[in-house]
Amino acid sequence: MATAALDLLRQAKAAYGPEYEKHLFEQYKLYVDMADRISARRMLANSFFVGVHTALITAFTVMLKEKVLQPTLTGLAPFLAVVLLCFIWWRVVHSYRQLNSAKFKVVHALEQMLPVAPYDAEWTALGRGSNARLYLPLTHVENWVPVCFGVLYVLLAVTLYTG
């Protein structure tokens, strides 16, 4: 991605002054750190959702075994709620994927103004995400986890009505 396409520059080097390179590099370091924090927040959100859904699957299984849930509309309501929660989780993962993609486009554009471009080189070495055998982005895998939990809830709901 070309730097001009992202419109990063606000001042020309000559107009900015002698601290241009130093400030550019400091901004680059800060921005890379911010991108890393987004990834950490994404992993924390996923850990939260996995924990919640693991507990819910366990609770639903026990409630089905003990016949606490009945095959009525009221008995189906908790399943609909947790499937909706799975959808929300999927959207959170999708949103983080979009945010990370944009952040790394900016990182690559900033690297065009620096002497080296390690993130761009790494992305190139990984085939720019186009070859799953070379590199499968984590968010592609992450998208399936809430879907799998959703399928488990559907199977438990089916058990409620057929068991």
Image (cartoon, grey):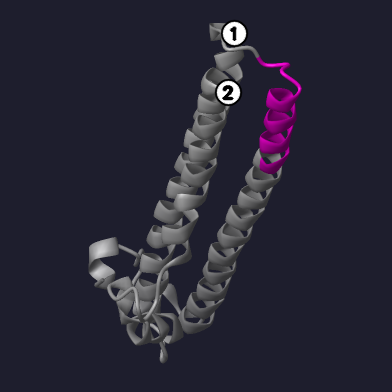
Q: Residue at x 41, y 59 (%)?
A: 140
**In x, y percent, where is residue 20?**
46, 79
Tell me the SS state at disc 1. helix
Which of 153/31 is in front? 153
Which of 16/8 is in front? 8
Residue underneath mark 2: 163
Which of 111/70 is in front? 70
**In x, y percent, where is residue 99?**
44, 54
Residue 92 visible, this angle: no
> Which quadrant is the N terminus positioned in?
bottom left
Q: Residues within 10 Å of mark 2 (few under 14, many from 20)?
A: few
Residue underneath mark 1: 74
**127 relative position to 119: left or right:** left
**In x, y percent, where is residue 8?**
35, 65
Q: Compared with residue 131, is residue 140 higher up or lower down, i.e. above or below?
A: above
Q: Compared with residue 70, is residue 6 higher up or lower down, i.e. above or below?
A: below
Quick check: is 11 in the magenta stretch?
no
Q: Residue at x 54, y 25 (%)?
A: 157
Residue 52 visible, this angle: yes
Q: Residues within 10 Å of mark 1 (few under 14, many from 20)?
A: few
Checking the image for residue 20, the label placed there is none
From the image, state whether disc 1 or disc 2 is nearer to you: 2
> Which quadrant is the C terminus positioned in?
top right
State whether the magenta stretch is mostly helix, strand or loop: helix
Residue type at tag 2: Gly
- Looking at marks 1 and 2 on the same chain, the residue that comes earlier in the sequence is marked by 1
Q: Residue at x 57, y 58 (%)?
A: 38
Work out how far the residue at label 1 is from the one at label 2, CA to CA, in angstroms.
17 Å
Tell me the SS state at disc 2. loop
Residues in magenta, as a range: 54-69
Do the residues under discs 1 and 2 have CB atoms within 8 angstroms? no
Residue type at tag 1: Thr
